[in-house]
Image (spheres, rainbow, N blue to C red):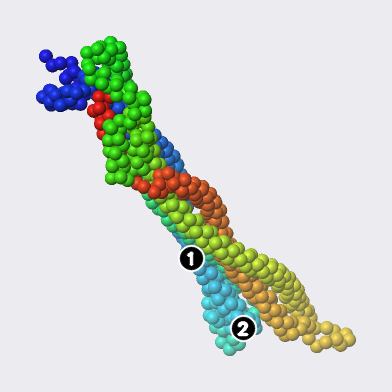
Amino acid sequence: MMPVRLLIVTLAVGLSCADARKQMKQEAGVTPIAKVLTLLEGMVAKGLAAKQEEETKFASFKVWCDGTRRRKEEEVSAGSDLMQKQQAKIQKAAVHIKGASARIQELEEDVGRWKKDQKSASSVRAMEKTDYQATVADYSESLDALAGAIATLKKQNFDRPQTDLLQQALLQVQSQKLVPSHAKRALAAFLQQADSVRAMSDETNLLPGAPEANAYEFQSGGVIEILEKLQAEFGDKKTALDREEMTAQQGFEAINQQLADNIENAEHEVSKKTDTRAETAQLKAETEGDLAATTRERDEDQVYFDDTTALCKTKSQDFENRQELRAGELTALHKAIDIIGGGAVAGSGDKHLPQLLQIKTALAQLRNGQQSPIQDRIAAFIAERAQASGSKLLALVSQRVAAEPFTKVKKLIKDLISKLMEEATSETEHKGWCDTELTTNKQTRDSKSAETAKLSAQADDLTSTIASLADEISTLTDEVAELDAAMAKASSERSESKAENAQTVTDAKEGQIAVTQAISVLKEFYAKSAEATALTQEQKAPAEDAPSTFDGAYKGMMPEGGGVVDFMEVILSDFARLEAETSTEEATEAEDYSKYMFESKKDKALKENSKSHKEETKVNKESDLHSTQQDLKVTQEQLDKALAYYEKLKPTCVDSGITYEERVKRREEEIVSLQEALKILAGTDIA
């Protein structure tokens, strides 16, 4: 069975049994109790160092866990917020697309209806024009027949033989469908009377030696009056028909133009709505793509956050378990040291192990202030290591080892080793903290610098766009003002021209009425004069004793009266032409004015619509600029804070004068040197 001392040595330093026996033979001058205590203390020191190293590593890991989870949580939250904004943007685009589609369908239905109205109006206009042409042809033919008959009758206005030319002219008038029945009956009676007269004349001419009789005496004054009245009536109706045709044509053109303008405006709006809908659909598709990418990134961040949380939780639990186990181990070692160093063990050693007496004698000598050779050896060893490594700490320790009493040297070295280990632990924690903070700060500085540059460029673009929109709005405002001035001037001129044309038409109508009344008065007078002349011709010659008066019957100033009527008819036609031309001119001016005002109002509406759209866009851009400037200000402040924090970190984490690796290496060399010095002390059998 392996001795207890050999077992303890084997477990403490991890040696094989053969190596342990060999080492114990070499250390025969050291008591077992002292050796065990040394091994236990070495185990305690090693356990403390391992525990502290583990705490240092976990502290760095915990800093990473906290920073990573905080960062990922912020990224997940930011991704969720961005997803909500993108979803709202997609919904808004869908509403706009739906509204634009409904409006396009409505406009297309209106265009279809207006085109049908155009076709219907054109068909009605064509039928009206066909009826007008047929009716005008009938009136023209009737007027030609009436004019020919009247001319023929007037040429036959004396007693003469009956001619076929007159009969043909009257028959042509009688055959016109527009001639009323009472006129046809009068013409038939006249023709029958003429035939009777011609028959009587033919019988008379059959008698030998009888003079040729006139076919009839001219009694067609009533027929001429009927024909002239028909001629005037047909002329008036033909003129009225021409006016109606012109009015109908103008109305058709106005309606057709209005429908064409409606169709053009609707098709223009359909084109704009279609383009806007396509742009909105493109924006919606892009936003949906962005939403999918954002969702993937958010989900990846969430998975990373969940994995990190689980890992950190597992590691924390493992760390607590390991620390608890290490603490229990150290407690057990301390108890073992207390037991070994207690009276039960160490007291027995005083009795049975003479080496301990030698150690006590040496200790007594040291307490009396005598210098030990081993102390000189340790001081020289540490001084040599200090010179080799350039450690000021080891040089100072060598001086203190040479100057301090021997009893304090071991404690001094242990305290220094413990202090160096604590510094190593503290510096390791500080290094982990510095690495985490520097990494996080660099990420913040890089991201905020990029974001600042992006926001600055965006602000410049928005400023340029706002200035351009302001110029365009100013130009549109001036153009709308010019249109308003031009339309006001055109309205004023149109009002003056309309009043002038209305007055001209009124004067022309009043002139026609007056001239017509004058012509009627003259014609009525001369008709009565003709009747009076006929009565006078039927009276017997006056008595011879009657005073002389005049030679023939008075017929009035027929030649002069006829000339005046002719002139009046010319004046009447001039008034009628003035009325027609002025009315046509008024209609043309009104149509031109309507077209000009319609085009101007349409142009004004388009400009005002464009201006309103640009003003709205400008307001939105100004709002975006304000938001961008606010974001830029906040981001710049964050960048400034990150830069200031980096400057704060530099003295302790960057610009310390010596690298962390060099400090660790130097500290490890110092610890190794002190531990070796401690071993030298342990090898002197001083307890």
Name which residue type carries label 2: Lys
Q: Disc 1 on helix, strand or loop?
A: helix
Type of amino acid under label 1: Thr
Foreground residue, 246 or 284?
A: 284
Question: Could you tell me which residue is drawn at 46 percent across and 57 percent down?
Answer: 457
From the viewer's perspective, is residue 118 above or below residue 196? above
Q: Quadrant of residue 76?
A: top left
Camera-side residue of 45 and 122: 45
| Residue 130 - label | 1
Q: Is residue 186 above or below residue 110?
A: below
Q: Please say whether residue 27 is visible from this viewpoint.
A: yes
Q: Residues within 10 Å of mark 2 (few under 14, many from 20)?
A: few
Mark 1 or mark 2, earlier in chain = 1
The residue lying at 27 percent from left, 35 percent from top is 377
The crowd level at tag 1 (other Cα within 10 Å; few <14, some 14-19, many 20+) is few
Question: Circles 1 and 2: CB distance less than 8 Å?
Answer: no
Residue at x 27% of width, y 22% of height:
359
Q: In this view of the protein, which residue sits in the foreground, 472 or 325?
A: 325
Q: Nearer the viewer, residue 382 or 194?
A: 382
Examine the image and state in which quarter residue 67 appears.
top left
Look at mark 2 in the image and give the residue it sits on.
155
